[in-house]
Amino acid sequence: MRIAVQKALQGRKIKVSAVCGGIKGVLVSEKEEVRQQAVDSMKEIITAAGALGSTGMILAPAFHNQTKLGHQETRELLIKQLAELGDYAQKANTRVLLEPLNRRECHFMRQVSDAAAICRDVKNPGIGVMGDFWHMTWEETNDMAAFIAAGKYLHHVHMASRKTRKVPGEDEGDK
């Protein structure tokens, strides 16, 4: 797949910004074998992201019902896992980008500042943050403040309309 994308990009001015999807397993599962499956698949994706010149591979640590761990346990496990993955991402010349989701999709890491705090605790330049305006609609009181709070950890932003997750301005009544 990576080679096909590289060939498709040859001679073009378009670049891969971030890589999203394809992770098998759950990085913060209570089951070791499920976590290892996630780590293994993430390393493959990180390698491809680096080869494509991408700023990073997007990671939403867990959706609803993917883990039975509580908030603190989930956070501690994530920080432990990200140390190894951050080193791997650095060697691949890219990073892992934490994506905060909204309360309808997850119980954990719902604000950009939550993700930035995890980055500060991991202390690894191979770990960064992204923001997604659609998710931020439900969780942030001020988009600019969220991005300022993320500081040096912010490396990618998903642009989307507020109501239906379309291209900005396509929702009827968006201003």
Image (cartoon, rainbow, N blue to C red):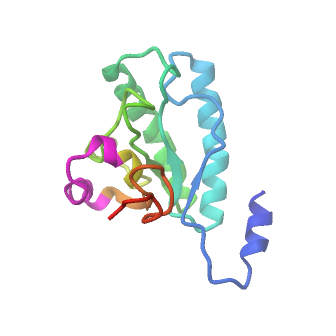
Q: Which quarter shows the N terminus?
A: bottom right
* Residue drawn 37% across the image and 60% down it: 173
How many marks overall? 0
Task: Tell me, yes or no, whether the highlighted magenta stretch contains residue 52.
Answer: no
Q: Is residue 141 left or right of residue 173?
A: left
* Residue drawn 25% across the image and 56% down it: 143
Q: Which quarter shows the C terminus?
A: bottom left
Secondary structure mostly seen in magenta is helix
Task: Tell me, yes or no, whether the highlighted magenta stretch contains residue 148.
Answer: yes
Residue interval drawn in magenta: 136-152
Quadrant in the picture for residue 3: bottom right
Q: Position of residue 116 (x, y in %)?
A: 29, 47
Residue 84 visible in the shown view: yes
Quadrant in the picture for residue 93: bottom right
Q: Is residue 113 above or below residue 63?
A: below
* Residue drawn 34% across the image and 37% down it: 110
Q: Position of residue 13 (x, y in %)?
A: 62, 83
Q: Position of residue 64 (x, y in %)?
A: 47, 24
Q: Which sits in the foreground, 158 or 6?
A: 158
Q: Is residue 96 left or right of residue 73?
A: right
Q: Is residue 57 above or below residue 175?
A: above
Residue 129 visible in the shown view: no
Q: Which sits in the foreground, 174 or 73?
A: 174
What residue occupies the far front of the structure in this picture? 172
* Residue drawn 66% across the image and 43% down it: 22
Q: Which sits in the foreground, 163 or 109?
A: 163
Q: Position of residue 122 (x, y in %)?
A: 34, 42
Q: Which sits in the foreground, 173 or 62?
A: 173
